[in-house]
Image (cartoon, rainbow, N blue to C red):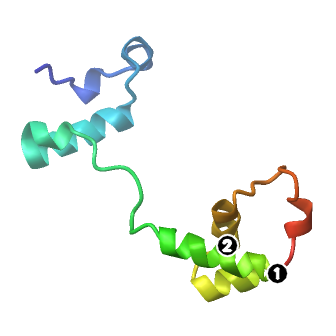
Amino acid sequence: MVIFDEQDWSLSNERQHGVTQDTLWRWRQGFAAEGAAGLVPGKRGPAGPVKLTDEVVARIRELAERGGSLAAIGAETGVSTATVRVALGRRRGSIGWEGLLDA
């Protein structure tokens, strides 16, 4: 493993290797703390559990068929209005979007 000396690191090295001083610092900190395992990026993705389960989607669709507003459906199911739109398959700019702009 080649360890770069921060004193010798320059802008030309950053451009040549595509690695900034910040990245180099993070690598050194990770390696010092955990060895080679510290160089592996952490888990990416959702920080918590997904709220949009099949049961929630079914309930959202049921409430929408009854004429509930996005805000009311979201409040009753515990999700945001954006999540209600996703569950209903409605995205910004899609047909019917304009009629969904309720509070």
CA distance separating discs 2 and 1: 10 Å
Q: Nearer the viewer, residue 57 or 38?
A: 57
Label 2 secondary element: helix
Quarter of the image where the N terminus is located: top left
What is the tally of numbered marks visible in this picture? 2
Q: Are marks 2 and 1 in contact (CB under 8 Å)?
A: no
- 100 in relation to 90, above or below: below
- 62 in relation to 40, above or below: below
From the viewer's perspective, tell me whether residue 13 is left or right of residue 51: left
From the viewer's perspective, tell me whether residue 16 is left or right of residue 36: right
From the viewer's perspective, tell me whether residue 58 is left or right of residue 43: right
Q: Position of residue 54 (x, y in %)?
A: 49, 68
Q: Nearer the viewer, residue 80 or 7?
A: 80
> Which amino acid type corresponds to the residue marked 1 in the rendered image?
Gly
- Quarter of the rendering containing residue 96: bottom right
Q: Position of residue 76 (x, y in %)?
A: 63, 88
Label 1 secondary element: loop
Quarter of the image where the C terminus is located: bottom right
Q: Residue drawn at (75%, 76%), measured in percent from left and top?
A: 64
- 59 in relation to 13, above or below: below
Within 10 Å of disc 1 (Cα), the crowding (few <14, some 14-19, many 20+) is few
Q: Position of residue 80 (x, y in %)?
A: 64, 74
Q: Nearer the viewer, residue 88 or 18?
A: 88
Which residue occupies the extreme right position in the image? Answer: 98
Q: Residue drawn at (28%, 48%), measured in percent from left and top?
A: 42
- Quarter of the rendering containing residue 48: bottom left
In the picture of the structure, the residue carrying the numbered disc 1 is: 67
From the viewer's perspective, tell me whether residue 30 is left or right of residue 73: left
Q: Nearer the viewer, residue 103 or 63?
A: 63
Q: Which mark is residue 61?
A: 2
> Which amino acid type corresponds to the residue marked 2 in the rendered image?
Arg
